[in-house]
Amino acid sequence: MIKCQKELFEIPDGITYLNAAYMGPLTKRAAEIGKVAVEQKLTPWNIPVSEFFDLPGRVYNLSAKLIGAEPSDMAIVPSVSYGIAIAAKNIPVLAGQKIVVMADQFPSNVYPWKELAEEKGATVETVSWPSDDDWTRAIVEAIDDNTAVVATANAHWTNGSFIDLVAVGKKARSVGASLVLDLTQTLGVVPFSVKDVDPDYMVVGAYKWLLGPYSYGFMYVAERNHGGKPIEESWMTRKDADDFTRLVDYKEAYESGARRFDMGEKSNFIHAPIAAEALSLILSLGVENIAAYLKTLTDHIATRARKMGLNVVDEGKRVPNLIGINFAGGVPENISSALEAKKIHVSIRGDSIRIAPHIYNDFDDIDRMFEVFEREL
């Protein structure tokens, strides 16, 4: 079991930040690395050409290690919506087929499928909220021989309800459906392996649980899909792009693996080193260890919530890093202002108070939040 890592962060006394699902803070070390990177741009003549390729190379290696993939399976993207657009462009969908999504799924993994369905004469089937919180069963039951795509996540972003992606992936493959995952709310703090799940595409934004920069993320593309079409034609994705003297010898061939799917300017000299530092920290602590630590916090939240008669998803049906306190009639209006007055940061999502602790939180943070709940509810 790891201990609280608050000393790595610049979180002042009096601030209770339980909102990693909204945005994760940088570590102090990552911020210093970012400052050095910004200052480096003052003297661009000191930036070697090799940095265009060495920086993303570090990101490929680290992000691949995080999910049990090969570096050649990884691409760098600016956002989840960018990665989902790549998947939507390359998955064949026929008229009359369906694309399965969850109710209230995050929009970045819904809008592209609505557009594709309209274009192809397909339908988007929305799986309703299960009364027993068993999203895995509900999604698996929705997948049939007419399913072209299953677009989902490892947890529902509003309250942390768990989805067993191994089971979903097995059912999707049995009917020939493609599996597209947005793991922004779980990757890095919940164990995940592409070897176990076998998705066609997986996308994650780095700025939440991965403690990285905004406008930067990673995409896994299964080897069977490496021959697809990118959504932009960057000079860096073409074969022999590292030979700056011959860039006008235009090449039809792409770099091997998933490189063709990289965003333009993937070598971001500021974001890439910050992201690499953040990934290195996650890997050094160990995802399993982080998950075990965060589970102690969310279990404590669940215990205290139930003692107050509040509704949370049962253990075994929620992820370790994210938990929602659900209110059938909507979250009471006084709660947000009361928490804000005490500098306690959570999110209101739908009918839930979403609480998202990370490695900088401890039991004192949870208890401080419940002092407000006990007074206001």
Image (tube, helix red, strand yellow):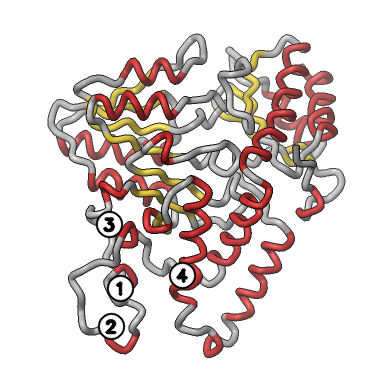
Reading the image, the residue beneath label 2 is 247
> What amino acid is found at the position of numbered circle 1 in the picture?
Trp
- Which element is circle 4 on? loop
What crowding class fits label 3: few (fewer than 14 Cα within 10 Å), some (14-19), or many (20 or more)?
some
The quarter of the displayed image where residue 335 is located: top right
- Which element is circle 3 on? loop
The Cα–Cα distance between marks 3 and 2, rounded to whole angstroms, is 21 Å
> What amino acid is found at the position of numbered circle 2 in the picture?
Leu
The one nearer the camera, 141 or 366, is 141
Reading the image, the residue beneath label 4 is 267
Reading the image, the residue beneath label 3 is 231
Q: Position of residue 368 (x, y in %)?
A: 84, 31
The Cα–Cα distance between marks 1 and 3, rounded to whole angstroms, is 13 Å
In screen coordinates, is 189 left or right of 64? Answer: right
Relative to 149, does residue 53 appear above or below in the rendering?
Answer: below
Give residue 235's mark: 1
Give residue 4's mark: none
The quarter of the image holding the N terminus is top right
In screen coordinates, is 81 left or right of 23? Answer: left
The Cα–Cα distance between marks 1 and 4, rounded to whole angstroms, is 12 Å
| Mark closer to the chain start, 4 or 2 | 2
| Mark closer to the chain start, 1 or 4 | 1
- Which element is circle 1 on? helix
- Which element is circle 2 on? loop
Q: Position of residue 197 (x, y in %)?
A: 41, 34
The one nearer the camera, 166 or 366, is 166
The quarter of the displayed image where residue 39 is located: bottom right
What crowding class fits label 2: few (fewer than 14 Cα within 10 Å), some (14-19), or many (20 or more)?
some
